Amino acid sequence: MAGKNFALIGVAGYIAVRHVKAIKETGNNLVATLDPFDSVGFLDSYFPEADFFHEFERFDRHIYKLSQTDKKIDYVSICSPNYLHDAHIRFALRNKADAICEKPLVLNPWNVDALKELEKETGKKIYNILQLRLHPSIIELKKKIEEGPKDKIYDIDLAYITSRGKWYHYSWKGDVQKSGGIATNIGVHFFDMLTWIFGSVKNSVVHHSSNETTAGFLQLERANVRWILSINYDLVPENIKAKGQRTYRCIMIEGNEIEFSEGFTDLHTEIYKNILAGKGFGLDEARTAIQTVYDIRNAIPVGKKGDFHPLLQESF
């Protein structure tokens, strides 16, 4: 078989199908998969011959055996719960494979430093899925900002409301120790995108923080950002609800909305193409957003003081 050999951890998860599709569309082979749950029938449409394991110990043994042959795994794709990413990245590198990990790469900034050392020790690479950096609308926005006045400070409002049912709170996603909380679990790629375009964080304030909604203010080098992130359906604007939609995604820059609702689903394949060409996003690119959400998670909310997002006023 031509192409690189992949293993995938967390294959029964929501995001895994995008990784499997990307492996297929880039002409590579999914050799082995792992998940404690067995709702993985979709594999038949892509890689029916892929080995499937329930238990990490058996998967570990299988990958190690392969690493001693010419069928060794080249990449391990990681779609496991956030708190396991660090361990699964280490597993990949110890087995002589590069790691491709969903966001957030890790939960704590010091984990990035430790992984940097592991890259040096093993000679292997760690890549993060930061797909918004490849979204045409976001690339266009970055170009526009770079070509604009160098001393301009932009005013930005970010709102991302992605409704979730009761199940969310009973899953690992509802456990802040495992997911990192709302800002980390659903917001990390937005913070990555904003700092990529508008520069590093100079000041961060959290106005409100709960298990459903987090809101705050970020002062970046070239932007002031009021933001709100929530899984609460009640915060979705009425005109969006009227269309039968449960998700609201809006970035306003200087009063103009940036539209990037479409085109999300195919970006994983583009990320994989870049990684296979040696141009993926690594630890250094991931670091700023991980620090940002760590600081948000550990901040003491100040309440509705100062410059807070308008949706916070309406709802709390």
Image (cartoon, rainbow, N blue to C red):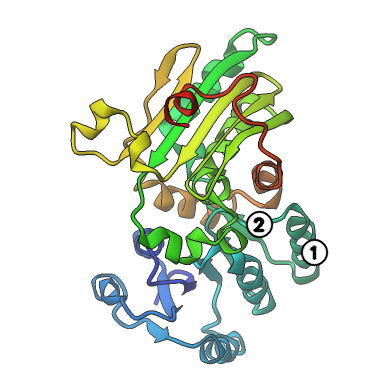
Task: State the image coordinates of residue 27 (x, y, percent, origin top left).
Answer: 38, 64
Q: Which mark is residue 131?
A: none
Lateral position of residue 48 relative to residue 312, left or right: left
- Can you tell which quarter of the image residue 193 is in? top right
- Can you tell which quarter of the image residue 160 is in? top left
Number of callouts: 2
Crowdedness of circle 1 by 10 Å Cα count: few (<14), some, many (20+)? few
Amino acid beneath label 2: Leu
Front residue of this view, candidates 102 and 205: 205
Q: Name the residue tied to disc 1.
A: 120
Amino acid beneath label 1: Lys
Q: Which mark is residue 107?
A: 2
Front residue of this view, candidates 253 and 70: 253
Vertical relation: 100 (above or below) 281:
below
Front residue of this view, candidates 275 and 233: 233
Lateral position of residue 41 relative to residue 11, left or right: left
